[in-house]
Amino acid sequence: MTPTHFAFSSMFFLGLAGLAFHRTHLLSALLCLEGMMLSLFIALSLWVLQLDSTSFSPSPMILLAFSACEASAGLALLVATARTHGTDHLKNLNLLQC
């Protein structure tokens, strides 16, 4: 395993671990998701550069566009929950409570 592959794999798994174990606020979960998407974007960009192929060159930009859409949807959900519930704690967002 090359050092760059190890760095991006560990960056992705640190974001995944943060998402799994630190779920108190919605904002921290969204930041962990953005860190995971950033590591995937950089890894995919380096993979396209190493392949030296033009057929895969738009794939990092497509991933970046999906990441921007995911970030905007997450921020819209954050604003909506902050307006309705008054906080972004994930404990207060139980759908089973009335």
Image: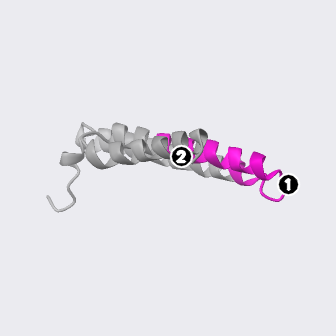
Q: Which residue is mark 1?
A: 54
Report whether residue 40 is seen.
yes
Going by the image, does 81 lie left or right of 94? right
Q: Residue at x 48, y 48 (%)?
A: 73
Residue type, mark 2 in image: Met
Task: Name the mark nearer the viewer: 1 or 2.
Answer: 1
The secondary structure that most of the magenta stretch takes on is: helix
Magenta-highlighted residues: 34-61
Please tell me the numbered disc located at residue 37. Answer: 2
Dividing the picture into quadrants, the one containing residue 29 is top left
Dividing the picture into quadrants, the one containing residue 8 is top right
The secondary structure type at the circle numbered 1 is loop
On the image, the x and y values in percent for residue 4 come to 60, 40
Q: Residue at x 53, y 46 (%)?
A: 37
As for residue 11 lying within the magenta part, the answer is no
As for residue 38 lying within the magenta part, the answer is yes
On the image, the x and y values in percent for residue 19 come to 34, 46
**Front-most of 45 and 4?**
4
